[in-house]
Amino acid sequence: MPRPPPLSLRRARNDSTNTMFDVIIVGAGAAGLTAAIYTSRRALKTLVISKDVGGQAVMTTHIENYPGVDLVSGAEFMLKWKAQAEKFGAQFIFDEVSEVKKEGDKFIVKTGSQQFEAASIILAFGLTPRNLGVPGEDRFRGRGVSYCATCDAPFYKNKSVAVVGGGSAALDAALLLGKIAKQVYLIHRSEEFRGEEILLSQVKAERKIEMILDTEVREVKGAEKIEAVAIENKKGEKRELEIQGIFVEIGHEVKADFINSLVKLNDKKEIIVNKDCETSEPGVLAAGDVTDVDYKQIVISAGEGAKAALSCYRYIQKKNGKRGVGIDWGKK
Amino acid sequence: MPELKLTDDNFEAEVVNSKVPVLVDFFATWCGPCQMTGPVIEELAKEYEGKAIKIGKVNVDENPKTTEKYGIMSIPAFRVFKGGQVVDEFVGAQPKEALKAKIEKLI
């Protein structure tokens, strides 16, 4: 028979006001959802605020490297994680957090239309796709310029497309489009691809993919629809490729403006964390791609989310004069 | 389902000739972000049932004519119709609160 949570936590959890929580988790990707499972199971009244469910994982239909899972689509997988968090009592609000600040010994979290209070915060809002930053990109966004190959590839049956990027995501996109489109131009600004070797050899074997190296995109051109992309290589040679769509896979960045005075960031604007996912501000934990942990993978974010949740529990317990996680499987 | 199932056949009647504004979600069953948006649209359709707005979905695989007519090249894609015209459009998964805000402006 499991021990019931301590009285102070039970009171907090049964608090009928919907704006005060033990912890607010910003972001519902792999890190945020795992953190929500762990904080909820520790009887911390948990609110997850996120624009979306699942984060970057949702963009892929083939996850094959998550331990124990043979093959699953991102959307299906992350919906399960969300259901699991809800099962243990986590609450969700789908909105964009505009501000997080400290007030006394608690935190205020604002969205466009609402305001919440929490004793602690877990920042897990991940990364945002980088834009090319060239003329024509904004004009054709959603009308030929795409950041999700798995969503939009089918619209380019028998058409010509460009994929920009040098990592696994770009290689993946090129392979997917190679099966559907008439012609794929894979444009990368350096000589070597950073993506997984297994994908690169598949790309090289696909006749419909033309690799264009040492080259950058200068402009996306067209009248009503995309008609061409202007490119230039390192030697200054210019070319125009006739295409109907362009897939941007040049990596991600952190959009951290709303917390940049709350916690210390590194020069890439990632949140600096220690091994226990603690940030420079007591009571604020961070996990997942948004942190300065080098590798960005679902299983890593999940692990970091669990650590952040346990550190969060320890912080709240200590505030109430109690112990953190027990000796048999963690620090006091 | 509470949201309208819009098709090539009923689009004219339900959307273009509608007396109230219509929020249309263009989706496909294999698109990840569309799967995440689906439940949100359902909830909104339930919440705004009986109000001066219609909320519907178009499966792009099954309805090529409507998909082509409105230049859909990226999904999920949203189009807002008023008096038969597209008055707003946006692409990509939207948080529930953002969609609610757009709906509130219309009714």
Image (spheres, coloured by chain):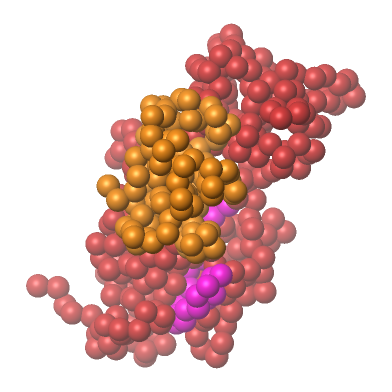
Chain colours: A red, B orange
Quarter location, residue A111: bottom right
Relative horizontal placement of residue A201, taking residue B49 as reference (left or right): right
Q: Which residue lies furthest to the top in this view?
A: A207
Residue A126 in percent (x, y) is at 54, 55
Relative horizontal placement of residue A73, taking residue A129 as reference (left or right): left
Residue B40 in percent (x, y) is at 39, 54
**Is A116 in the magenta?**
yes
Residue in the picture at 42% in, 59% down: B52
Q: Which residue lies furthest to the right in this view?
A: A236
Q: How many labels does the image show?
A: 0
Q: Principal SS element in the magenta part?
A: strand
User: Which corner quadrant holds the N terminus of chain A?
Assistant: bottom left
Q: Give the range drawn in magenta.
A: A109-127
Quarter location, residue B63: top left
Q: Which of A179 and B63 is in front in this view?
A: B63
User: Which corner quadrant holds the C terminus of chain A?
Assistant: bottom left
Q: Nearer the viewer, residue A122 or B15?
A: B15
Residue A235 in percent (x, y) is at 89, 23
**Is B53 in the magenta?**
no
Residue B1 in percent (x, y) is at 27, 47
Residue in the picture at 58% in, 52% down: A127
Whether residue B22 is visible to the viewer of this picture, yes or no, is yes
Q: In this view, does B35 lie above or below A309?
A: above
Quarter location, residue A99: bottom right
Q: Residue furthest left?
A: A1
Relative horizontal placement of residue B86, taking residue A63 as reference (left or right): right
Whether residue B30 is visible to the viewer of this picture, yes or no, is no
Residue in the picture at 76% in, 28% down: A223
Q: In this view, does A165 lie above or below A280?
A: above
Residue in the picture at 55% in, 11% down: A205
